[in-house]
Image (spheres, grey):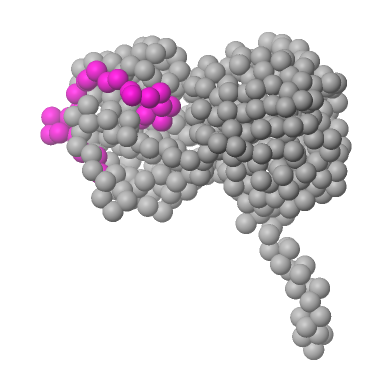
Amino acid sequence: MKKMIIHGGKPLSGEVVIGGAKNSTVALIPASILSESKVQLDGVPLIQDVKNLRAILDDMNVSSELNETCLEIDPTQIVSKPLPNGKIKSLRASYYFMGALLGRFGKAIVGMPGGDDIGPRPIDQHIKGFEALGARVSNERGAMFIQAPDEGLHGARIYFDMVSVGATINVILAAVRATGTTIIENVAKEPEIIDLATFLNNMGAKIRGAGTDTIRIEGVPHLYARNSHTIIPDRIEAGTYLSMAAAIGNGVTVKNIISEHLDSFLAKMEEIGVHFDVNEDSIYVYPTGDLKMVTVKTMPYPGFATDLQQPITPLLLKAQGEGMIVDTIYPKRVRHVPELVRMGANITVENDIILLHHTDQLQGTDVTADEIRAGAALMIAGLMAEGTTTIHKVENILRGYDRVIMKLTNLGANVEMADEADVADANLAADPVVAEKKAL
């Protein structure tokens, strides 16, 4: 296990370049196995989730090679095999192999996914979609067994009972090679879904309506990747650095941004009192003055993203008055709150609503990143705080943030990574009994 050590209170300045979208990448990599030719993805973020997905590909005899941010995947020798446990448990997005394997082979055995503990995230809508396409689905010994009929999957009309990014992606992956027409209604509209549809369409799929309420898919028998696909910029990483720039920045430019993907977030930043210039593919954030507390309510895209409610929290603590965060997507996503309280934040949770009050100064201390975006909030808080903040379980941050130490250092932050073992070694070294034994 690793830890991040932040010596806070130092204003940040300069430029930071945003990487490819994590939430696109973790769908595109499983989607690549639908191709009957080699796939090339450009702008791949260097994050732990990519490493874990590549390990799962390797288990299926799918080779992959990462050269800087270009990932080449060769699914031409893929072997259909069960993926019941092990690496599947390491990240939530592993469940996209359900739809991808079902689309490629007509069957899938995939373990129930892992990922961050941010409250219930059922996959009932995924199952509903698979069954509508003709598959039989059962849960046996903690793994999903999915089997298409002998004649293969068939098109269907599917209405999701709730908007779900995961179910939308999984059903697209299963339906692109099904026979006939599939119409999916009440789907998620996230930019990452448009990115996936663009990738598949460039391989010969016939997907229309991505980014709207209804997606129509005409099944095709084969898919072949012919061109490199460049992944869209990560709007969540961008929002995190924009929050950071507003909270502790002395003039920061965040580059490689599609600002339209951040409309609701930028509107909220403006409401808080943050001043910034939006350019063609970058945003410059001015040093902040007086800020105003607001209410943040997360909603499905194009609303305020649930993944950005935690990164914006430390910035709100600088504002005057009382504020509120209501997460309608994951109400239990409050693991960062007690850690911020340890740093001196005036923040509480009542009936799943986060209540914020102005906090003059945060103090560095030991905190734990229990999930990706909670870790991002603690990272920003640590940069704002007086003294030293040590973030444990930093692997959760590395799952979603590309080359974070390098990017923070380039902005002028005093931050480093260390092994948890260093703490134990230091304690042992200070133990007089141990020291005496070493002397003997």
Compare residues 309 and 54 and report the one nearer the observer: 309
Q: Quadrant of residue 63?
A: top left
> The C terminus lies in which quarter of the figure?
bottom right
Residue at the image position 45 percent from the left and 18 percent from the top: 189
Compare residues 125 and 257 and report the one nearer the observer: 125
**Residues drawn in magenta:** 145-170
Compare residues 219 and 244 and report the one nearer the observer: 244
Q: Quadrant of residue 199?
A: top left
So how many labels did they put on this image? 0
The answer to whether residue 169 is magenta is yes
- Which residue is most to the front? 350
Residue 319, given in percent of the width and then of the height, sits at: 78, 26
Compare residues 70 and 156 and report the one nearer the observer: 156
Query: In this orientation, does residue 244 appear?
Result: no
Q: Is residue 121 left or right of residue 147?
A: right
Residue 205, given in percent of the width and then of the height, sits at: 33, 18
Q: Is residue 352 left or right of residue 168?
A: right
* 83, above or below 189, in the image: below
Residue at the image position 58 percent from the left and 28 percent from the top: 326
* 44, above or below 341, in the image: above
Residue 345, given in percent of the width and then of the height, sits at: 75, 40
- Which residue is most to the left? 150
Residue at the image position 73 percent from the left and 68 percent from the top: 425
Query: In this orientation, does residue 164 appear?
Result: yes
Q: Is residue 366 left or right of residue 325?
A: right
The answer to whether residue 288 is magenta is no
Residue at the image position 70 percent from the left and 38 percent from the top: 347
Residue 228, given in percent of the width and then of the height, sits at: 49, 23
